[in-house]
Amino acid sequence: MSSFSTSILIAGVDEAGRGPLAGPVFAAAVILDPGFTIAGLRDSKKLSAAKRESLAAIIRSKALAWSIAQASVDEIDCLNILNATLLAMRRAVEGLAVKPEQVLIDGNRIPDLAVPAQAIIKGDDKIAAISAASILAKVERDKLMCEYNQQYPHYAFHEHKAYGTRKHLAEISQFGILAVHRKSFNPIKSLLEERE
């Protein structure tokens, strides 16, 4: 796990929730303290929910700065998921209390930023700050899915996290499309077109 040069302030950026059928897309930006190593940082998808939660608490208390942002369902439907994700990433970087000198982003696209940035494929498993961002974004999104489960008890959002699982598709078929569903995503888009 690389942390890049420690002589400049580096923000790691990652997203959570590009693929699901409902809810906003989240992004987080984290500037780690070069003097404090957080053990166990890696791609959030490779960690248990409990491990993510415990690491998120350490990241929030020990990072030099962190920020979580999102792009709404309406923005996803209007801009498309790629552009909405880049918007959420830009908001996360702009929300940092400390201005980074360089931004490292998981993936192959870079949002429009006022600071130098580099995209790193599989960066969430290579760069500690990106791993930290991936954990914060995922924990925040999962928290929202649990809130959705309270709001919409017929939907098991706490289980499928709004991904297009067989269970979620059955719920849509039985209970209908919710305000939090992404209307530009199939099969929701097709269902809406059929109704028209």
Image: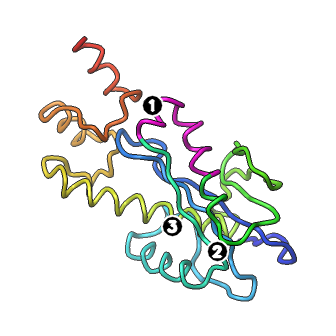
Q: What residue type is labelled 3?
A: Leu
Q: Which of 109 and 78 is in front in this view?
A: 78
* Labels 2 and 3 touching (C-beta < 8 A): no
Give the number of the disc on residue 43. none
Q: Residues within 10 Å of mark 2 (few under 14, many from 20)?
A: many
Residue at 52% x, 66% y is 135
Q: Is residue 79 magenta?
A: yes
Name the residue tied to disc 2: 65
Q: Residues within 10 Å of mark 1 (few under 14, many from 20)?
A: some
Give the Cα distance between marks 2 and 3: 12 Å
Q: What residue type is labelled 2?
A: Ala
Give the Cα distance between marks 2 and 1: 31 Å
Name the residue tied to disc 1: 77
The number of numbered discs placed on residues in the rendered structure image is: 3
Name the residue tied to disc 3: 136
Magenta residues span 73-90
Q: Residue furthest bottom?
A: 35
Q: Earlier in the sequence, mark 2 or mark 3?
A: 2
Give the Cα distance between marks 1 and 3: 24 Å
Residue 173: where, in percent of width, then height? 17, 30
